[in-house]
Amino acid sequence: MSVRDALDLLQADLGWLPDWLISAAILIAPAVAALLVHRTAVRWVRQLVPPHREFLQSLIAAADGLIRLGLVIVAVAVVLPVTPMPAAARMAVAHGLVVAFILLLGWSATATIGMASDFYLRRSSVVQGYDVLARKHVTQVRVLRRVAGTLVVIVTAAAALMTFDSVRQYGVSLIASAGAAGLVVGLAARPLLANLFAGIQIAVSQPIRIDDVVVLEGEYGVVEEITGTYVVVKLWDRRRMVVPLSYFLEKPFQNWTRQSTDLIGTVLLWVDYSVPVARVRARLEEIVRESRLWDAGVVNLQVVDSSERAVQLRALVSARTSDDAWDLRCEVREKLIVFLQSEYPAALPKQRAELIDFRRLSGRSDKRDAA
């Protein structure tokens, strides 16, 4: 006996019930059966997978909802042709199943992108820090994941809407009429599209990465987050500056960690002409050798400027990171000032003035006049 014959017999026995109630029962029963089968299967698979296999456990958790929805759609689609309902109602249910299947595909694609990116980062042992290669991978994966997710959502929504005749006809009429409507839509979507393409460019060309030290709009900060439309920069005083992605492609900015994290710090001091430059240079070398912040790279002292009152000394010191460079600059500046105060106080900047005794000058003028 086929499924169709069994349903006909059941309908004959329950002829006193309305057709819509029988149809609802026929559709709900396989859906409930699919949910029970799914629940049993998932519980069995979880028992087989050891708890320490975190990736497999997370994979099962991520696929749980997808498999449940897929089984329900398949179960309802199988019994739909044999339900005793009008053709119009059957077509409406079938259309709903098509929309649900399209949404399931979009959901599956989004989940696959997320799991693949997480698996790549975990397999590559990529961690955030001062490693340029690690930050490159983290930035590329995160930005491309957001861009791909946005594209999947747009395509899924468009595909689901195009299954409705009214929406399809409206889209065709818009294309046929074009003109001002197309222009308005294009202008409205311009910021979204600009940031979308900017995200792809940033992921490929890498002008910025996660944890990059940047200076923009006169503010110093660290790139904390890169989304599909904007970048969050954590400033030195813990404020957050939110900048559109397109900013980093259209305007100039400073990236202190583009190729490497090491930096050269500068300390400027105005001193008197009597300063012993060689002795100050020797003291600078002693300071940086004693400091844990110096990377054993650059240390130098030069006279870079002079005026009618003083000369300017420039001390160059290098460090492994921007934070270390800042702290090392402050340490060098403080210790050089203390050194000059204690050893060569006369070398500190001073104002020179000449005192003139106007009374003596006036007395000499009177003697010249009398003579």
Image (spheres, rainbow, N blue to C red):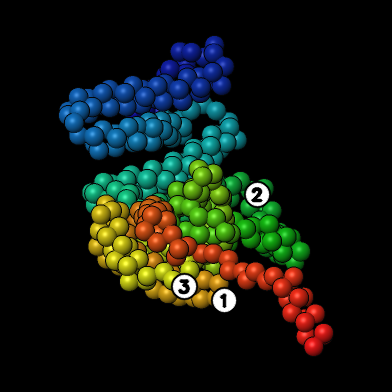
Mark 1 — residue?
A: 308
How far apart in space, not on screen, are marks 3 and 2 (Cα)?
Answer: 82 Å
As drawn, 241 above or below 67: below
As drawn, 252 above or below 84: below
Type of residue at label 1?
Answer: Glu
* Residue depicted at x 54% and y 60%: 216
Q: Give the percent coordinates (x, y) of residue 28.
A: 45, 22
In this rendered view, identify the residue nearer to me: 283 or 72. Answer: 283
The residue at the far front in this view is: 371
* Residue depicted at x 50% and y 43%: 238
Callout 1 secondary element? loop
For mark 2, does the 10 Å Cα neighbourhood hold few (<14), some (14 to 19), or many (20 or more) residues? Answer: some
Mark 2 — residue?
A: 167
Q: Give the percent coordinates (x, y) of residue 18.
A: 57, 16
Label 3 or label 2, whichever comes before in sequence order: 2
Can the viewer see residue 208 in this picture? Answer: no
